[in-house]
Amino acid sequence: MKILYVFSIYLPLTGGCQDPIDQAAPYMTSRGHEIHVLTKRWPQGLPDTEDINGVTVHRVDSAILADELERMAHDVKQIVREVQPDAIHVIGLRRPLPFFALLAARWLGVPVVMTVGGWDVPDPDDPEPGKVWTSGKHLIRNAMLQADQVNAASNDLTRLVRLEFPELGDIPVMRVGIDTQLFAEATPTPWPRPYVLSLRRLEDSKQVDHVIRAFAEPAIKDHDVDLLVVGDGQQAGTLRRLARDLGLEERVHFLGEVDIQQAASLMKGAALTAVVSRAEGGGLVNVEAQAAGTPVLATRVGGITEYLGGDKGAYFIDDTSPAPLAEGIRRCLTDSALRTSLITYGRQHAEVFETRHLVEGYVDVYRSLEPVARSRGFEPWSKLTADLWDIFRGTDGAQLHSGQHELTARPAELDGLGASANRWWYTRAEIFGQKDWPEFEAHALRQLRDEYGDEVVEGLLAEAAEWGRIDASALSVYAESVREEADAS
């Protein structure tokens, strides 16, 4: 089959549902499949088309405003006309590409499968996914209802989907996997001391700050062990400052984002990996640790226990405050019987997530959906979605009839900040309906411009718009990361 996978982001960015397909691609190609990826160009500057590990990656510019969505419609139509996929599989449902995947599938008469991953739908235990969901709900919710199959990457994500979509019937679990050999045979990263690894996106719900605080506790303060924090995110600057304030600069090291080979080596060399999330869709990083033979300390939230294979898969901790967490880390580092048990069980369990086995099931699903997909049409639910569908049905020169987006009067503090300001304000005022602009937010934005300059603030606005973060305090958190990165360099 010729399969088009659709991701919000793809390599060179790692750490999400894109990694399993990258790892499975050589096997799928060897089985006669042709693999393509459609993704947003993020960060900017990446080429339109690129071959990565045998996968043809097609990139389109991000779109929020109506004219940007029109441009994306033309770009996606051109890509799928050239690729002519037999099936389209969206993994991770963040706007707007899942909507365009539906349009493409209906235009071509091929099946479209949508897999819900972490942060894709609202989570009562974490407010951040709700922001991402709200920023794209006008395009994504009905697109999911018209997909040939909606599934979820874990049983816990199925639960969250049912909360948002009580009208959906069967929601199967379609797990994502890993190349177990990549992690089992990785060369350990050389490091002068034993280290605990935190390989996470640096967001509040991941609670990396709890792990950092634990390293200042007596239970492990005097142990000859470091903490390596790997990843990036909104909290990066806050976490750097926390480590400095606690006097842990010599023990807590921030390595930023790494590629999958580096991640495997870091995992292989770690004495322990700590995953103490407050909410987690699945937690594939835990399975990666198991495959590498690294013990896992984790919380029992979301899909973590499921992905770890139950109680035997990790040392589970309920209280992540500094003292008990430090004690849990100490035990995982020093209790040889516990370590042996976790490593032995983990290596066996990780084989369940071998991506080569899982993707064969994916292909079976695509083929089972082919007959019904040929006859299904697209049903617009707004003038915008009807106009975008007309671009697929019509000629290449088709234009939106709705004209340019109507933007609520923009605050003067955003003048001179380019397209990023328009996209952020549109997200705030039109999508979230927050059209007021209190003086404290105006003051905060003026301060940011004075301190960092317009070029940096444009970047902050661009990032915040993508994540549905619409208040000035979110911009300040991003700005702190910019400051800390500059100080570190």
Image (tube, rainbow, N blue to C red):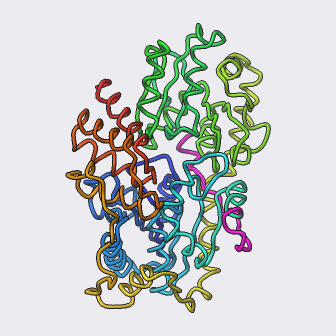
Q: Does the magenta run of residues contain 170? A: yes
The C terminus - image quarter: top left
Q: Is residue 10 visible?
A: no
Where residue 126 appears, x then y in whole percent? 61, 46
In the rendered view, does 343 fall on the left or right side of 457?
Answer: right
Q: Is residue 161 above or below residue 238?
A: below
In the image, what residue occupies the spot 36% across and 57% down? 425
In the rendered view, does 134 fall on the left or right side of 458?
Answer: right
Where residue 51 appears, x then y in whole percent? 34, 60
Where residue 66 appears, x then y in whole percent? 34, 72
28 vs 20, nearest the viewer: 20
Q: How many marks?
A: 0
Where residue 102 appears, x then y in whole percent? 50, 77
289 vs 467, nearest the viewer: 467
Q: Is residue 425 above or below residue 196?
A: below
In the rendered view, does 114 fall on the left or right side of 233?
Answer: right
State the image quarter where residue 8 is shown. Answer: bottom left
State the image quarter where residue 56 is shown. Answer: bottom left
Q: Is residue 202 above or below residue 98?
A: above
In the image, what residue occupies the spot 54% across and 18% down? 194
392 vs 82, nearest the viewer: 392
Q: Residue furthest front?
A: 439
Q: Is residue 399 above or below residue 143?
A: below
Tell me which secondary structure the magenta stretch mostly adopts. loop
Q: Is residue 213 visible?
A: yes
Q: Residue furthest top?
A: 222
Q: Which residues are magenta?
A: 163-185
In the image, what residue occupies the spot 49% across and 26% down? 228
Q: Residue furthest left?
A: 416
State the image quarter where residue 176 is shown. Answer: bottom right
In the image, what residue occupies the spot 70% across and 32% down? 343
Q: Does the magenta run of residues contain 473? A: no
